Image (spheres, grey):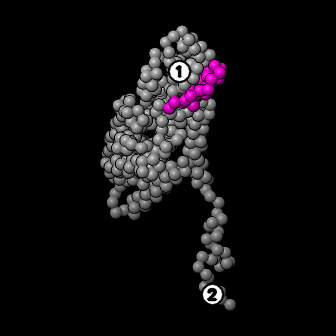
């Protein structure tokens, strides 16, 4: 008897061709491709571990400025004793009166002021740094206990009720950063075929959207701040725009390594040096040095100065954020020149040819794969 027509997808022996293809082993080149891309998460793991554990695993004060209020011999002796016993942990000075001590706390040149006596009092400013205030309080609680008196703690710059730990600004920094560098992956990957000026406009637009979202988080949604939302939005926009323009510009040079690059710049080195959890006086010197000019520190300290300290030091932090934005614009401009040069030296394929069409299709598929991989790496973070 003659065999009838075979079902679709089966050979004469009844084998399913689709199943046969599915069982076919992957080529060595595909495995090498996957292994090559696994290098990125491994580097992220190593980098995040070194950065976060190096910055946060063992906070300890060094050169933490505190004041002893008083001008007599007893105040001088106490200050010198604390300075010597601290072995570099404290930088203890004397100030003449309470008003001077409060002024130093409010301009953030000091993190605690101790008023000795039968009823000792400690002045702190938790809005400057809650963890620094806790470190100072721990030290002077022992001093007061040695004198046989309970310590009264007065906060001259408290944080609002919506941010009792004083770390809400740091977590706002995290949200702004993720929104910004994830946008870099999308603009650089999915938007790689667009002209650079269009990508730059997208970066500007996303910085505006991200900053507005952050302002909503900080104000009406979570009440992290109770005033100064306009200034907080401006600082958020400067910060987000700097990240986006640096990232979009770097994508021309780094390609699929852009996600790792922006993570190093704006997560590993940025979050750890921002001062949002521990100020540089409680961290290793490397992160304290970065705190002086990194953009995350410019944002956190700028918002603190604007919201809690009547704008003290705000100009310097605005300058830091502005310089990062200018650096981003410079990198983007350099990317534009580089892309123009690449176009000038790359021959244009002949139109309306089968081979040319196949090559263009292959390039498009390769670009799509790279874009998807880059965005997956960004989202996976």
Residue furthest to the top in view is 73
Name the quadrant containing residue 322: top left
Q: Nearer the viewer, residue 31 or 109?
A: 109
User: What SS does tag 1 mark?
Assistant: strand
| Secondary structure character of the magenta stretch overall | helix
Name the quadrant containing residue 244: top left
Q: Nearer the viewer, residue 167 or 188?
A: 167
Q: Tell me what residue is drawn at x 61 percent, y 81 percent.
A: 7
Q: Nearer the viewer, residue 267 or 305?
A: 305
Q: Earlier in the sequence, mark 2 or mark 1?
A: 2
Q: CA distance from mark 2 to mark 1?
A: 102 Å
Q: Tell me what residue is drawn at x 56 percent, y 28 percent.
A: 152
What residue sits right under mark 2 in the picture? Answer: 4
User: What SS does tag 2 mark?
Assistant: loop
User: Is the residue marked by circle 2 packed among few (<14), some (14-19), or many (20+) residues within 10 Å?
Assistant: few
| Residue 232, x across and y down, in percent | 38, 42
Q: Nearer the viewer, residue 183 or 191?
A: 183
User: Is the residue marked by circle 1 packed among few (<14), some (14-19), or many (20+) residues within 10 Å?
Assistant: many
> Which residue range is magenta in the image?
133-155
User: Residue 185: in sight, yes or no?
Assistant: no
Q: The N terminus is located in which quarter?
A: bottom right
Q: Tell me what residue is drawn at x 53 percent, y 40 percent.
A: 165
Q: Is residue 313 above or below residue 26?
A: above
| Residue 83, x across and y down, in percent | 57, 16
Asked if residue 143 lies in the magenta stretch, the reply is yes
What residue sits right under mark 1 in the picture? Answer: 115
| Residue 213, x across and y down, in percent | 41, 51
User: Residue 22: in sight, yes or no?
Assistant: yes
């Amino acid at each position: 008897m003659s065999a009838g027509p075979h079902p679709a997808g089966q050979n004469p022996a009844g084998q399913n061709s689709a199943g046969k293809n599915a069982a076919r082993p992957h080529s060595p080149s595909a495995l090498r491709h996957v292994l090559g891309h696994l290098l990125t998460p491994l580097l992220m793991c190593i980098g995040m571990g070194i950065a976060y554990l190096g910055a946060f695993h063992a906070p300890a004060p060094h050169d933490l400025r505190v004041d002893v209020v008083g001008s007599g011999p007893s105040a001088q002796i106490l200050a010198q004793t604390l300075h010597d016993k601290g072995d570099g942990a404290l930088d203890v000075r004397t100030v003449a009166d309470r008003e001077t001590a409060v002024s130093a706390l409010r301009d953030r040149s000091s993190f605690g002021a101790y008023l000795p006596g039968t009823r000792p009092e400690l002045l702190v400013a938790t809005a400057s740094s809650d963890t620094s205030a806790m470190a100072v309080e721990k030290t002077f609680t022992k001093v007061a206990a040695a004198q046989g008196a309970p310590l009264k703690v007065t906060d001259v710059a408290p944080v609002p009720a919506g941010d009792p730990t004083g770390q809400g600004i740091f977590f706002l920094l995290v949200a702004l950063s993720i929104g910004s560098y994830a946008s870099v992956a999308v603009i650089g990957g999915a938007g790689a075929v667009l002209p650079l000026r269009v990508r730059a406009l997208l970066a500007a637009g996303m910085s505006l959207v991200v900053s507005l979202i952050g302002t909503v988080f900080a104000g009406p949604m979570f009440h992290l701040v109770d005033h100064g939302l306009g200034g907080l939005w401006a600082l958020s926009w400067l910060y987000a725009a700097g990240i986006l323009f640096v990232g979009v510009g770097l994508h021309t040079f780094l390609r699929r390594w852009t996600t790792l690059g922006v993570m190093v710049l704006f997560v590993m080195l940025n979050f750890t040096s921002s001062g949002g959890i521990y100020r540089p006086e409680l961290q290793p010197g490397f992160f304290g040095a970065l705190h002086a000019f990194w953009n995350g520190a410019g944002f956190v300290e700028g918002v603190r100065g604007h919201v809690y300290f009547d704008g003290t030091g705000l100009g310097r932090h605005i300058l830091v954020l502005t310089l990062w934005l200018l650096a981003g614009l410079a990198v983007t401009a350099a990317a534009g020149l580089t892309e123009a040069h690449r176009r000038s030296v790359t021959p244009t394929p002949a139109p309306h040819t089968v081979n040319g069409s196949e090559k263009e299709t292959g390039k498009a598929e390769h670009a799509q794969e790279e874009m998807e991989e880059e965005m997956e790496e960004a989202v996976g973070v």
